[in-house]
Image (spheres, helix red, strand yellow):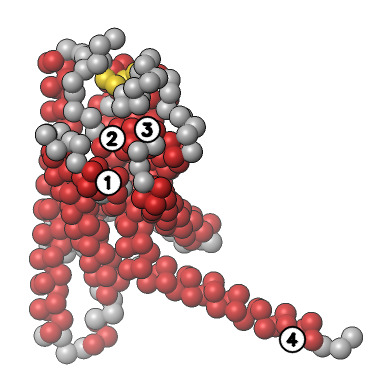
Amino acid sequence: FHTFPFPRTLFFLELQKFASGSVDVALGVSFLSKTGVGILGNSLLITYYLTSFLLGSKLMPTDLTIVHLATVHTVMLLTRWIVMASGMLGLHLVQNDAECKLFTYVYRITRALSICTTALLSVVQAITISPSNSYLFQLKVQIPNDILPVLAILWIPNSLISTNLLFQMFASSNTTNMDANCYLVPINTLLQGLILTFMALRDILSLGLMSCCSGYMVLLLHRHGQQVQHLHSPSQVPKTLPEKRATQTIVLLVSCFVVFYCGDLVLSLFLGSSMKNNAALLNAAMFVPSGYATISPFVLLTCDRRVIKFLTNFLGNRIIKSPQKTMLSARPL
């Protein structure tokens, strides 16, 4: 096969740097540590919701969406961590066609699902807090029954859009050229353009939904704040505080996504131009794409008072039980 001059994604640039051993050890350790922290955070988030479910709590539509988002991020970060760690240790994990196809396919799907799930989360929260006179309020009753099918449907188009990698991606037969571990073979220009169009439309639609829903939720929060100022009975205020905090958390989460998405886009544009060999950009390209997946679980964990209360009770019980054991062991027989 002849290599195809198609712009490489940041994933391939990262992989090639690690595989070639050109990454500074300290920088590589920092990347692996940051990715490991992200995997731990998403795992804690999944564990919390699963524990709550097993203890009898009913998971709301937003909870199920968050669990799906955390699962997607865990798989995405784990894929990156395995590839980068293997490259640093000189294991050359990505060295045949099947491995090139597997890692790139899984990585692209999970990145696509990350943006789609974040958009869905903002939509679900906007519907949840919509007033009774709103059109969105009519959808609130349907969400609990429809959320799981919608999450499952998200996998279908994203998996189909990325199937071209299963036919285009191959491992390089030239083992001496460390800059070409994986490469794309050419396909029909019209088909390639159609795939890129679908990907662009998916991102634009997702960002549009996030922006509209975030603006809508901010407007509702502003109106709610004005109404609270005119309330004379403070007993009505706590009733809306949990939904208000959840909405603020979702808006903050969407803002984080937009920041990292734009940073990733700018880096991709620069690395696809004459600055593709810039060391500073290549180093930044290792950290920015996974920044949202790393930070998002901690935004959700620290902003959710249920999590804080759960951890407080859990740690409090351990602290209480520990002195009791000490006292029992100190008693004379």
| Type of the residue with mark 4 | Met
Q: Kindly report which numbered mark, 3 or 2, lies closer to the viewer in this rendering.
A: 3
* Above or below, comparing residue 306 to residue 51 in the picture: below
Identify the mark nearer the N-term, 4 or 3.
Answer: 3
Identify the mark nearer the N-term, 2 or 4.
Answer: 2
Residue at the limit of the structure toward the right, as seen here: 333
Identify the mark nearer the N-term, 1 or 3.
Answer: 3
Name which quarter of the figure residue 203 lies in. top left
Identify the mark nearer the N-term, 2 or 1.
Answer: 2
Determine the secondary structure under disc 3.
loop
* Measured Cα–Cα span from mark 2 to mark 1: 10 Å
Determine the secondary structure under disc 2.
helix
* Measured Cα–Cα span from mark 3 to mark 2: 11 Å
Mark seen at residue 13: 2
Mark seen at residue 330: none
Mark seen at residue 327: 4
| Nearer to us in this view, 178 or 202 | 178
Identify the mark nearer the N-term, 4 or 1.
Answer: 1
**Total marks in image:** 4
Residue, disc 1:
283
Q: Is residue 329 left or right of residue 267?
A: right
Mark seen at residue 20: 3
| Type of the residue with mark 1 | Asn
